[in-house]
Structures are given as structure tokens and as C-alpha cells.
Amino acid sequence: MEDKAQIQEAIKIQGEVVRKLKSEKASKEQIDEEVAKLLQLKARIGGDDGKHQFVLKTAKGTRDYNPKQMAIRERVFNTIIGCFKRHGAETIDTPVFELKETLTGKYGEDSKLIYDLKDQGGELLSLRYDLTVPFARYLAMNKITNIKRYHIAKVYRRDNPAMTRGRYREFYQCDFDIAGQYDGMIPDAECLKIVHEILSELDLGDFRIKVNDRRILDGMFAVCGVPDDKFRSICSTVDKLDKMPWEDVKKEMVNEKGLSEEAADRIGEYVSLQGGMDLAERLLQDQRMSRSKQACSGLSDIKLLFSYLQLFQVTDKVVFDLSLARGLDYYTGVIYEAVLTQAGVAPAPAEAQNGAPAEESVSVGSVAGGGRYDGLVGMFDPKGRKVPCVGVSIGIERIFSIMEHKAEASAEKVRTTEVQVMVASAQKNLLEEKLRLITELWDAGIKAEVMYKKNPKLLSQLQHCEESGIPLVAILGEQELKDEVVKLRIVATREEVDISRADLIAEIRKRTSEA
Amino acid sequence: MEDKAQIQEAIKIQGEVVRKLKSEKASKEQIDEEVAKLLQLKARIGGDDGKHQFVLKTAKGTRDYNPKQMAIRERVFNTIIGCFKRHGAETIDTPVFELKETLTGKYGEDSKLIYDLKDQGGELLSLRYDLTVPFARYLAMNKITNIKRYHIAKVYRRDNPAMTRGRYREFYQCDFDIAGQYDGMIPDAECLKIVHEILSELDLGDFRIKVNDRRILDGMFAVCGVPDDKFRSICSTVDKLDKMPWEDVKKEMVNEKGLSEEAADRIGEYVSLQGGMDLAERLLQDQRMSRSKQACSGLSDIKLLFSYLQLFQVTDKVVFDLSLARGLDYYTGVIYEAVLTQAGVAPAPAEAQNGAPAEESVSVGSVAGGGRYDGLVGMFDPKGRKVPCVGVSIGIERIFSIMEHKAEASAEKVRTTEVQVMVASAQKNLLEEKLRLITELWDAGIKAEVMYKKNPKLLSQLQHCEESGIPLVAILGEQELKDEVVKLRIVATREEVDISRADLIAEIRKRTSEA
């Protein structure tokens, strides 16, 4: 019951919006969004032929994976899952949505990015924002006090997408967490070992894992003269240090957050420090820092952590970095973040061309992060019983982007199927014989294809093999049927050999065993 | 700012609702729902200790998967994916939500079960209801005219959950589809071959695959005297034949849908027919049926289909059944549905005890369904270009339920990790040595665990192995370190052998190679 004239007027106005944005050279994403609105309006009024016109797109900030992307995704997942399993993790799964109140009060400012479901009667639901809060809910609900689990699933954030840099509204997280009351820093060190193993194995170029501790940050704030109630707020300003220079961070602290210049300068000295076990040792002796009990227990733990990291042989990539803050509220101890340091491998930030701030490209490299959160499970337990947890989350979308770019640049073709053999015919009217043969192959576990045509040309059958990388063709003809053989063609060499029907399956297995 | 007194009043009323339901022996689900509402009210007012009380549950109709369930799920997926890959399918993925209008007009009456997202500004979105419509959208959007793909992902329906029977609001579908203009019935037959392979391999007991064709149904309705505009409506009544006896179906046709009794009786004769190729042949000769061109082309195709199914050697389980209708609007040709016929393996329908209709338990067995939908892609294409498609969807949740029950009943223990060896110590103060050893093992690709304690008891280390099925323990002690050996304990036999450090990795691989 829409008023056609009204919609036509809206289309006119929206058309002008788009033209204006284009003339102002607005960002591609902004233009795309307004164009989508325009198309939706046009769809409501119907196309020229009177049919309903669909806007053919995926939702903003999301994307499909085509078969080639899926092949790469499978490879990345296999590496990651392989590592998680090597470390003895079980896996769990939780629903894509949670009761809204399960997510309430866990993410601080970021809560505004949560997707809510429409109230259609019944419970109020939200899409999960990460896998950590559902994990904590799962532990409390099932009264589990120790578990080592991984969880690979999509999470949802109504953030500003930057898809060329691998930032989406629907994206995968690969989480590994260890819950339980254990001796200090052993599980924490294993999480870092895992990050090291995965990033090395994926071969994404050089990387660095920054480590810090929430207690060191809080202690540092205290001894630098930050008032208690400003800890969290100053902490999120420190968190911006990987995106903006100290001068700007200081300005924000003093001008916006009302910190004294003296206090800010003291913080500035500390957050410029980077090192290893030696730095932790030095800070334990530091006159000011040593006044904070909290900072001291954090520093002692950093020392212990590094001693385990030495045994795990991963200290080459790990840096104790006092500027690392991390945004999420729930961390209580050690925190860490892995960044790729080889800028070359990361996809070029296309937005920069459209006038987006160039410094953002610095943060392209962050691919994993995590830390200790000893209080989260207790927030769900009716009696507040705590379950100490530490974990790491691998940010897969960026890794996908890099792997995709690498695959495109490389000469090696990405196969999207695992077909070992194509059942083909050289003459007409052999469909039945081909179906009989492929049934034998399938039933023996051979991956095989046949064309869905009664009489396909031999050439088009061979072409399909070339295109999709199928290594073998089993060719049937009148003569082969009479001789009870199959002509086996090796696609790469174009060599052809007659194989008796009885030996065919063994022969195919032998010739594709390395694949 | 809620009025405490008001909420307390609401709690009182809700408490009475729950008591009333319990006294009336209402269904467990109804009671659970009202209890949840009560708990939510109580949560709003805060617990006794003044803390905010969470309702610790997953959203209605959803569930977590624990590690044991995940191990079973992985096994089932491996079988299904193995089959899809054997048949040369690629895979794709699509977002969990689509533009609302992408789903509009595809599901007929079932559209009311679609989950919508809240309008938070921007596009209107809905959770996907199946994987078929997103697949059609993907094909049209990318102008793909032929592909053979599988897609395994969760879909969402605001249906009445019946979780004990494997009916959830969030559930997996495993879809295999073939899109493209091909010679008749070859891809259709392959879909049935795939269902046959998967159900055989999963070993769920005996099954039957019912086959029919929308054109036969429509032709039958025409020759039986159903007015054109009542085809769909009468079709959904026929669809209920697996849940209620013919008498009731006829009553619905005559009394509710206004069909003449004569026409209903004619339909009744046809829908009682079951057979194979012979039945299709017989119906082609049938005086009344042969008057419909549509029915005849459907029947000829059924004959052709069966000839291919014979070559695929799957006719033992396939039945041409004229009562099969299937609910979804988009089917245009052959349709099919697989049912488990061995009632014993299915989980007992717990609801029946609470007064739910007993006849529903008949339909427990449906585990796969699909058909040909030649018009769906065209609905998305701006020029209406059609891409013929045929596919099958495996309904995994019921299969999970059955496998879980089987696993529980069997003596065999389900392992939730793949750990090959536990690194343990017999004496104190060997943590560093253990971490050194496990680093060697991890770096060699061995799946290994160590306890996160400085000085765990040997007994508790061995107990952990027994519990989680770890086959080997590598025990370090002062003597072993001096001798440069490791004591390797075989958990099953309690046998212990000294292995030199240099040979340890090879020895572990050898002893766990069959695992």
C-alpha cells in the first residue's frame, strides 16, 4: 500500500545524494551504501518490466566465500586446528545468538556494536560478539572448573567495515582457552607458544608478540598519579598508541581526560619501554614502580612467563611492551597481541586512496590477541565462584586476505575439488557404461566425476580436467569394453595406458596417493 | 528505575502461572518457558545478596555442544563431507543473515518462522532459513550457470522446538546441489546415490528413499478434478499423509479446503500407490493420468531416473511414492525424502508422555530431503534467466541424536582429544625438564600434554591419561635424565620401557600410528 509518487520523490532525492557523494569523491563504502539505499527504493517501486527487482547483494560488511576462497580457508583452518589438537584441546560449540542479558555489561563501550534480534515475542536475543563470553557462560552453566578447549566460529559486530583490510561485520574467530586453577604462568606461556606455532606454520612473514599485564598497567597508573576512577579511561587512551604518536595520546590524556601533565609525562616514559625478562627485572627495582604491589606481582609473573617461553623456544618473537593495553574490560592479568611486521605481505589499504587517515594502515598487522580473565566466569555464577581463564583468539580474516593475495600472486593453481579421476568416453552412447564404472569407483572410495551429458565431446571432458586440476581420466570406448580394459590418461603428460578393469582401482590409488 | 513493588507483584503472578501449569501437567517445554520468564523477573529484582542474577541458559530451541558431542559431530561431518568430495563437489559459504527481501516470498506459509534482526539503522536483515535460497542468490549475483557445491552451515527457524527428537531452532543443514543445464535425470540420480551412500556409511539402520515429482502431483490433481487455484493448498494437505491417516487427510480436503468428495477419493486411490519403474510404466498407461501431459513427462522422468538408479545400484532403498508432496514452494520436478525405518534406533519421543500427539513420532525418521528447483535462481536474476538446480539436504540433528544414543549405549569410549602422549614426572622439581621435552614433541608434530602444575602427583597424571584415553606416558625422573632416556608407559597394558631420547619421537609415532 505504498504511495508510488512518494517513493518516486524519495528516489529522486536519494539519486541526488549519490551524485553529490560521487562529485565530492567520498569513500567507496559510503557511496556503495547510498547506492544500495537507492536500489532498495527502486526495488520497492518495481522494475521497468513490472517485476519485483531484487537488490542482489549480501548484507553490509559481509561476504560470500567462493570455492577458491574456501579451499584457502580450509588450509588455514587445518593448520590452526592441527595446532590446537597438538596441544590437547577439546572443542565445543555454542549458539550464534545468546540471551541479550548474557552479553550485557561485558564489553564496555563496544556494547553498542552488538547486533540485536527483533523482538518477535519470547526472549530478547543478540548475536554473539566474541567467543569468550559464551565460553564463560558455558562454563558457569555446566559448572565446569577446568577445560582446555578451542572454538572456531563466526562472531558479529556492527562496526564500520573495511573489507579490503579484512575487517568485516561477520568474521571468524579461532579461540583457544585454558580454564582452571593452575600454577602461575604455565597455561599463559602455552597460549603464546600456540600463537608462535600457528604464525610460523602459516608462513605469513615476520611477526612479533607483544606482552604486558593489566596489573602492571594499573600499578603504573597508580604510581604515576592517575586517580583510581580514571584507570580504565586512561587505559583506553594508551591502547591508541599503536595508531597515533605519543604526542597525540598525551594531548588526549591531558585535554580530554583531565590528567595532569606531570602524570602524563611519567606514563610517557614507561610506555616507551620494550624489552624482555631484563626489563621486568629492571622495573622491579624501579623506585616509583616498585611502590605498587600490583605492578610488582605483574612484573614477577612476566619474569616467570619469560622463563617458560625460553623453554618453549619462542622468546625470539616475544616483547614485553608497556604500551600494550587492549580494549576489552574483562582482562585481569597478562595480555598479549601478535602483529605482522612485514608490511609487504598485507593487502594494500585501498581506503587510504579515498582520504582515510593513513596512520590506520599501521594497525593492519594485528592477527592474534588475548590474555587472562579470571573474573568473567564468576560474573555468570550465581554464587560468584571464579574460574581462572587464559586464552588467545586468532583473527582469521586478515590471514585469509594475505593468503588469498599470496595465492593470486603465485603460479600454483588452487584446486577447489579433490577429484582423482574423470570417467570419460571417446564414443557416443556410453553413458550407461560410464555410470556403471563410476559406481564401482565411488563404492571403492575413489573421488570421481562424470559429465552430466549423454554424449559429451572427448575434448570438453579433457578440458574440464585441465581446468579443475583432475590428474587422471578413465576413458571408455567400444574397444576398451570388449578388451575389459580402461584407457587411463595422465592429464599432465598426456600419456595413455590400458589398465585392466580388475586393476583400475589399485592403479588410480597408486597414481594419486601423493595428492 | 524499575518499580520494585511492581516487579514483585509480577513475580507473584508468574509464580502462580507456573504452579498452575505444573498441576495441569502441561508439556515440559511450556513449563520451562514460563519458569524462564519467572527467573528473568527475579533477575531484574536482583538476588538475595543484591547481585544481579543471570538466567543461565541458551536461547530457546538452541543448545551448546559439549566436547563429546563435538567428537561425534566431527565424525558425522567427516563421513558426509567425504561423500560430497568423492562426488567432486566444491564448497562455498554465505553469511548467516541475508537482506530480508532476499528471503521474502520463497517459503510460502513458513515465512512466519523467519528470525528478523532488529532495525538498528541500515539494512533490514533476517537469519537464513535454509541454504538453498542463499545458494540461488549467490548464483544469480555471481552469474554462475553451473556448479556442483556443498554447503554445511546452521540455519534458523522460529519453530516449536522438540529437542528430544532433534528438532531445534538453530540446526545444521548439509546441502549438496548441482546447478546447470544438463541431460535429464543424471544429476538427480546422483543426489539419490549420495543420500544412499551417506545413510549406508553412517550405519543408522535400514532406510527408505521416497521419490515423487511435482509434475506428477500437479497432473494428478488436474485429472482428479482439483481446481487450478487449489493445487498448492491440496498439495500441503497431501504432505500430511505421513503424519495422519487418509481419512483425516480426506476430511481436511473436503471440509476445510472445499474439494468435492469424488475428487478426494480419486486422489486417495493414487496416493496409496507405491512402487518402482513398473508403477511409473503402469501410470503412463492409466486412462485418467495419461490425460495430463505434465504427469506424463514426470512419469517418463521417473522411469529414466530409475534406470540410472539401477546402474548406481541403489534401487533396493528407493520407492516411487505418490503420497510424497514436500512443503516448500520452490520445487518444480523430482522430489525425494529419506526416512529411517528402524524405529528402535531413534530417540524415544519424550513429549509423548506429556500428552503430545502420539502420531507425530511416526515422522521421527525423516533425515534427508530435496528435489529439483528450476525456477529459484531466475527469481533473483534481473532478467529472469533460469539456472536449473537439483539438490539434497541432510538433516543432521536427528542423526546426531541417534549417534549420541548409540555412543552412550556402546562400551566404546568417545575420545574428545587426539593426544598421543602425556609428559609426566615421577619426582618433584622437574617442570622445566618436562617443558623442554614437550617442546621437542610439539615441534615434531606430536600431540602432547603436560599438567599445569609444578609438582603434580604421578598418580594424578596417570589418572588423567586413563580418563581421556591418552595411550602413552613419557615419564621423566632423575635417573632417566642422567641416562638420557625416557620411561615410556603404555597406559592400556601398564608396560614400561626405557627409550633413548634420540628415538623417542619415532617410537611414539610408531606406537600411535594406528590411532
Image: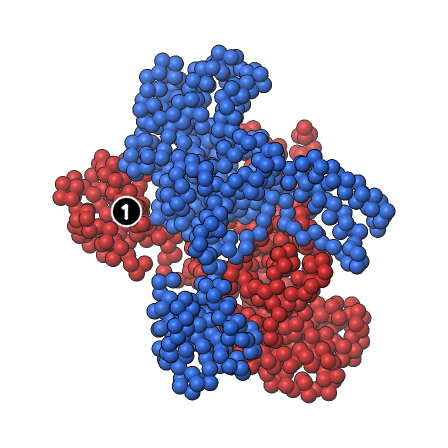
Chain colours: A red, B blue
Question: Which image quarter holds the C terminus of chain B?
Answer: bottom left
Q: Chain of mark 1?
A: A
Q: Which residue is mark 1?
A: A441
**Residue A131, can we see it?**
yes
The secondary element bearing badge 1 is classed as helix
Q: How far across and how far down the image is residue B64, in percent?
A: 58, 52
Residue B111 appears in the rendering? no
Instruction: Residue at 38%, 25% (x, y): give it.
Output: B274
Q: Nearer the viewer, residue A145 or A338?
A: A145
Q: Write the residue at 84% across / 51% down.
A: B1
Q: Residue at 28% across / 54% down in the picture?
A: A471
Give the answer, above or below, for where B355 lies relative to A472. Answer: above
Amino acid marked by disc 1: Leu
Q: Is residue B368 left or right of residue A307?
A: left
- Which quadrant holds residue A201? bottom left
Within 10 Å of disc 1 (Cα), the crowding (few <14, some 14-19, many 20+) is many
Q: Position of residue A204 (x, y in %)?
A: 47, 68
Q: Position of residue B241 (x, y in %)?
A: 49, 26
Q: Which quadrant of the figure has residue A290?
A: bottom right
Q: Nearer the viewer, residue B265 or A306?
A: B265
Foreground pick, B154 / A476: B154
Residue A394 shown left or right of residue B37 in the figure: left
> Total marks drawn?
1
B2 w.r.t. B343: above or below: below
Residue at 54% across, 38% down: B349
Q: Quadrant of residue B472?
A: bottom left
Above or below, A321 relative to B94? below
Q: Is residue A433 left or right of residue B180?
A: left
Residue A457: percent from the left, percent from the top?
25, 40
